Image (cartoon, helix red, strand yellow):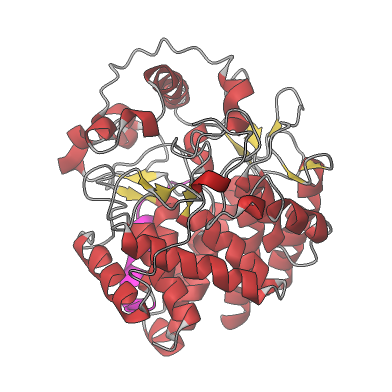
Amino acid sequence: MSGGHTRDARMAAPDGRGADPRRIAALGTAVLEANWRTTHTVPAPGLYPHQWSWDSSFIAVGLRRVSPRRAGQEMDALFAGQWDDGRLPQIVFDPHRDQDYAPGASFWQSTSIPGAPRHAETAGLVQPPNHAWAVWKIHQADPAESRRRSFLERSYPKLVRWHGYLTGRRDRRGSGLACIVHPWESGTDNSPLWDDVMARIPDDCRTPLNRPDLQHADAGERPSQKEYGKYFWMAERYRDHSCDDEDRDYPFLMEDPLFNTLLAVSELALADIAAELGLPAGVHRERAQRTAEALEQLYVPELGCYSARDAITGAVVRKATVNGLMPLLLPGQAHADELIATLNGPRFLGGGALMVPSYDATAEDHNPALYWRGPAWFNMTWLVAEALDRLGRTGQADFLRGNIGKLAAEHDFPEYVDPWTGAAHGTRSFSWTAALALETTYQRSAL
């Protein structure tokens, strides 16, 4: 269904089923328990059988409400896959499930890449850096247990190395912003933000394109075979250069507002962690400020939000996506009023949406069922709610948090939903949906 037209016929309020906070908490906890795999939580039992990087951070945020210790184990398992250069990999693979997801461990062959861990098979790509923020929240859930287990002491140096990788080798333009080298690194894989660059990417990859994902989600909700050809072509090239970030002719280098906002937010969390450990915190606050200032290069006044920039051509994409609203999370945001107006205008919530659309609802190519090209995602809506709460807009934050819990429980914790009707799309029993439904229920209720 294309966008650019009225939504009134499709708007519907949740019917109230699943609104009981204890029921939401119980159902969400059950999903997380079912998706636990000894050391970590898989995003979904069929479609995503490995450990994903930023998923684990969102999962840990909710999991800490029922088991701070297990939430800490979630992060420990991810940190075990860290590379020598500091990167936290997009995926830590379960080698017994290689046939169930593509590209898997046999594609990356990471244990033969210099600097990759030898005890774990991982992807060479990364994902948005929400990890320090999650670590700090886990500590806050039970400081005594965290101190007893030295959770912050062992996490802090790993997080410092991770941020050092992003602000060093990934600042390819020297702009003060980290670049992503693949749409998968953005977390918003199929976003219209990448369309212009993707048009120049070949799709003649060498890897046979098996699509295990289509066994668990409708083809109309997933990227096309041609798009997957481009994804694999880039992954092949990055892998074949030993994931070294030194390929000068690499064709996909994007500065993303979501990725860099989470880097700044996590740098502020590192300041809190450092202060707790009795270490200098000022350097982290300064780095967060530098990233926040650099983000101003991505503000697009005519859109009323931030957007992504092609680090090769210098062109800023003229498309409004949920990624461009994320700098609302940063303290002292210079464009807070404009961002709030855009959020509440026709591009996003102004048409009566229950959760935040991932892409401009007025765009002709908006599709409320297609992966990152219109549907609402629970993690993005939660991030927006967090920003609204920090800005004192507690009523709207509570509205969004309430819908996160209700829609999650009503539809068996879906991967994403139609923003206006709440109709479920993607896979079910999705872990960050369950975790954030749990988190928002605790935020709204005295459980």
Give the left or right position of residue 413, taking residue 115 as reference. left
Tell me where residue 272 appears, x and y as whole percent. 62, 76
Where in the figure is residue 361, as x and y percent of width and height?
A: 62, 40
Whether residue 326 is in magenta: the answer is no
Numbered disc total? 0
Please tell me which residue is depicted at 62% across the width and 28% down the height of the picture: 364
Relative side of 402 to 4, left or right:
left
- Residue that sits furthest to the top in the current view: 204
Residue 269 visible in the displayed image: no
Residue 111 vertical position relative to residue 127 in the rendered view, above or below: above
In the rendered image, the residue lying farthest to the left is 96
Q: Please determine whether, in this image, residue 278 is positioned above or below residue 408.
A: below
Residue 326 position (above or below residue 306):
below
The boundaries of the magenta stretch are 65-84
Of residues 225 and 133, the one drawn nearer to the viewer in this rendering: 225
For the stretch drawn in magenta, what is the main secondary structure?
A: helix
Taking depth in this image into account, of 108 and 381 the one nearest to the observer is 381
Q: Relative to 312, is 75 on the left or the right?
A: left
- Give above or below for 266 relative to 22: above
**Depth check, front residue: 316 or 253:** 316
Does residue 337 appear in the picture of this structure?
A: yes
Location of residue 225 (image quadrant): top left
